[in-house]
Amino acid sequence: MTGTALGAAAERREGHLKVTGAARYAAEHPLPGRAHAWPVPATVARGRVTAVDTTAALDLPGVLTVLTHENAPRLTEPGDPTLAVLQDAVVPHRGWFVALVVARTPEEARAAAGAVRVEYAVEDHDVTLTADHPEAYEPETVNAGHPARREYGDPDGAIDSAPVRLDVYVSYRVPPLHNHPMEPHTSTAHWEGDRLVVHTSSQGGNAVRATLAALFELPEDRITVDTRHVGGGFGSKGTPRPDVVLAAMAARETGRPVTVALPRRQLAAAVGHRAPTLHRLRLGAGPDGRLTGLTHDIVTHSSRIKEFVEQAAVPARVMYATPSSRTLHRVVRLDVPSPSWMRAPGESPGMYALESAMDELATALGMDPVQLRLRNEPDREPDSGKPFSSRHLAACLREGARRFGWDRRDPRPGARTEGPLLVGTGVAAATYPVLVQPSTAEARALPDGTFTVRINATDIGTGARTVLAQVAADTLGVPLERVRTEIGDSELPSASLAGGSSGTASWGWAVHDACTRLGGLLGGLTGRLPAEGVTARADTDGRANAESPYARHAFGAHFAEVTVDTVTGEVRVRRMLGVFAAGRVLNARTARSQFIGGMVMGLGMALTEGSTMDAAFGDFTESDLASYHVPAHADVPAVEAHWIDEDDAHLNPMGSKGIGEIGNVGSAAAVGNAVHHATGVRYRELPLTPDKVL
Ligand code: MOS
């Protein structure tokens, strides 16, 4: 890396297109003859469809067809059972799609969907997660391939005999959470002869293409997937969703382009959620605060059709030095919608619980919570014994404490009041793993002195186009304005998804290598470039995914100040401050946005967000943004994100770690710990709504 483009606060390249409405999202492709489809969700939580009467719906104006499990095209059985839409009569959960109405306009499709009559054979359902559920079991692995259980030493014995002991028998509870991106899950599909073209809102176009190829038995080169602009995902668009399958089906059946834009109200059950987690934590420590044992046991739910296990005890394997530890996951398969990825899966709920427990332990020890964390810094990754490629948690804690003014804090809970308000401050740590996946990129030099970088990366609102241009310009040693990036099209060289905070590292590595190769080619050239330019390609397979001898994680520290209204029970966040150590920061502007976005999501998780499973109906009661409260501007106070530049040679050519998720990790715990400091009361169930706090 030689140039100066990396790290600069470059403005996002598609910003103007977005604010002027020129950026086309998946629903905004008004192809000639385009039709619109509206799904019909099941109204029972478990059972079978016994009859579908479409007569009334078909009589309504504009209706082209109604697809049900009886007449929909047969698909090859998908790897992901949530994509087997309209294939049989089984209803695995409420909200499962049992029909699809296709009509000329969205309004006609919606009206006709309401006229489809579905009859069911209903079975008893169970949607209630409890810590002692008789059907809870220990899976083989949890998400991201982690083992469900890790244990070393004698944690229970060590905790039982510890001088200071924290035993949270009453578990921390994180409710189901929903991603709710601004752009709901949407696809427009059309067939050009035997070619399928889809415009879809997804975090990874290559996976969409591979999935459609398998489902419809088409070679991948007959499918084009456009993901040029995506209005957020947060994990819920990390895998293909039913909208793209339904759109492709409906387009084939009607011979027209068809758009399926899932209505917000149907999202909660159809596109995944963060599964609820019940945590039991035990910590033992000596009088000096050093941990002697740690156990983190979690119970979560998954659906009947899919085992998806939120890996919430995994961050406890990374965080603190302890001679004994157990981290264990159990799961209960219930009649609920299938859970899925949501920003910082595992780390987000897991660190809420662990970092709250560390705060409780600090209180029990009479020790400052920053000091307690510093006291338990490990010199190797506790669970694996691997050396860290870099770990600057201590520096983040110290720098955060300094910037926040932590030393002025009176540690006594409930000591600070302003009229009816109690004021408190809290701290929590953050961690997120470094993930990288193989990708391919192409770089071309043109005779006019400009360069084009092509890679099927996805920009879900992060600024991927911009940072990849920075990587290219830096590698080539040319000004940023001379580099164009083409992304979001499956005709481009294939790339991994925008997920796991891995996008920039994965794509950037391939871009870096293609540009390095191109530089080599250009250096060997004599005379002018040919009209078509000179092109180099690089593929990081075998390198980006190679096992590292190092434990590689980003770290961070969150500080929060809250007020608690003793009259109304309302908690407001006054300020949040995060300091992160995430390798080299490649774009100061978009990185700050990512950190702050994650922190705000944690604010929502702490105070307002939560989906309630209605035990009688078997569905989430919150199905719109009026009932599922994400933070609005008025809820978001001064939020500051800072970082410590790390020089880590064990990552990738840019030296970057992921930044998309770590801002979210631990931020809810910092808010919760501040609420404890304000009130002296420990609330262990999120969100901290007035009914709980008063
Ligand atoms: Mo993110 S939940 O890894 O897309």
Image (cartoon, rainbow, N blue to C red):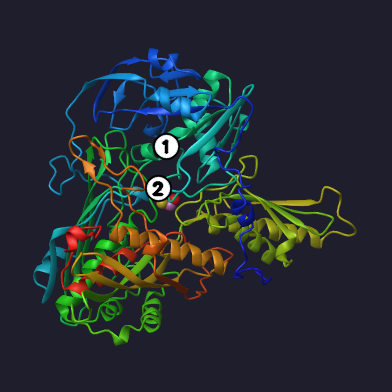
Image quadrant where one finds the C terminus? bottom left
| In front: label 2 or label 1 | 1
Label ID, residue 180: 2
Q: Position of residue 432 (x, y in %)?
A: 39, 62
Tag 1: residue type?
A: Pro
Residue plotted at (50% across, 43% down) = 202
Q: What is the count of numbered marks?
A: 2
Quadrant in the rendering for residue 523? bottom right
Q: Is residue 154 visible?
A: no
- Relative depth, front residue between 220 and 292: 220
Outermost residue on the right side: it is: 527
Q: Residues within 10 Å of mark 1 (few under 14, many from 20)?
A: some
* SS under mark 2: loop
Label ID, residue 263: 1
Question: Does the beta carbon at disc 1 come under 8 Å from ligand 1?
Answer: no
Q: Would you place residue 292 above or below residue 108 in this image?
A: below
Q: Is residue 650 visible?
A: yes
Residue 200 is left or right of residue 410, and the answer is: right
Q: Position of residue 492 (x, y in %)?
A: 65, 43
